[in-house]
Amino acid sequence: MAEILTLGEIVVEIMAKEVNQTFEQTGVFQGPYASGAPAIFINQAAKIGSKAGIISTIGSDAFGKLNHNKLREDGVDVSLISITDQLTTGVAFVTYKENGDREFIFHLQNSASSLIGPDNIQEEFFKECNYFHIMGSALFNKNIRSAVKKAIEICRRTNTKISFDPNIRRELLYDPEMRECLEYVLDHCDIFLPGGEELELLVNAKDEDGAIAHLFDKGIEYVVVKNGRKGCRAYSREGTFSIDPIQVVEVDPTGAGDCFGGTLISCLNKGLEFKESVIYANKAGALAVTKKGPMEGNTTWDQLREI
């Protein structure tokens, strides 16, 4: 049984070959690459050495098989991935701008992952689960939001800690049902891993210190604010610390935050102290951007220890 579980979308990613390439003109794209934020997270958690599994649905197609093979080969428990003939595996297209921004086109709402629902969640999955990780990107339809709420209820009975990475775009917050679910998850999580803008969007406070105080009042144990190229800031009731970024040559930033989260939770699961876990997560997030493809820069425990 998995020690770390997550739930959500599994997709392939098709990536522009050239910087400043647009979707409005014919161009060369590379891929498919195994992807999906929860999939990237759980792949990294497994590579660090934890028993890690994902609850999801893929199509009975080549894109689904590519993801299934990649996750299985990297040590992920794929037994909770359903395979369907109803819909195909999702696809994400991405282009890159010179300033580091990206533009996405997702085929997700009518993909196989949209079929995830409460029936996919069983209490027995959580009997040996120490951490359940929720990605905001996974909450894209009502059935999945219901599945996540069911899982949270089970986690409270099994003493499973809940980690939460919002991983959202600002415009998604205009959907009241999405906003309600994000706030519900935030109210029930133990570890919160926002980006700087996400902290501002989800927590009503004058500044970051006020937001952190508000989160601790909710009962959250740890908060790590991810700032990409600027490193991260970590908060616990024992104190606050910052970790400087590691200087690397960026090839592809996709999945770096998911890789950070997978490393952090897997390190905590292995019994490392919070600060040491954040240090390793910072290393993994940096190394993730050095290769083309969302999971191609994911690293093993031995690789991180060499840095």
Image (cartoon, rainbow, N blue to C red):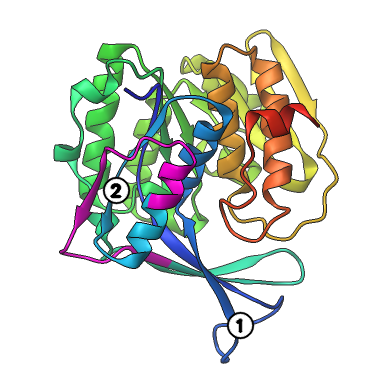
- Label 2 environment density (alpha carbons within 10 Å; few <14, some 14–19, many ≥20): some
Q: Can residue 71 be seen in the rendering of this structure?
A: yes
Horizontal side of residue 133 vs 259, given as left or right: left
* SS type, badge 2: helix
Is 70 in the magenta? yes
- Residue beneath disc 1: 22
Task: Name the residue beneath numbered marker 2.
Answer: 177
Q: What element carries label 1?
A: loop
Looking at the image, which residue sits at the far top? 238
237 w.r.t. 131: above or below: above
**Mark 1 and mark 2: span between their CA atoms?**
32 Å
| Residue name at image x 58 percent, y 29 percent | 48
76 horizontally vs 281: left or right: left
Residue 84 tag number: none
Q: Residues within 10 Å of mark 1 (few under 14, many from 20)?
A: some
Query: Between residues 223 and 47, which one lies in front from this camera angle?
Result: 47
The residue lying at 70 percent from left, 79 percent from top is 20
Q: Residue furthest right?
A: 247
Amino acid under disc 1: Thr
Up the image or down, 69 lies above or below 93; here it is above
Please provide percent x and percent y for residue 30. 57, 74
Q: Give the range drawn in magenta.
A: 69-91
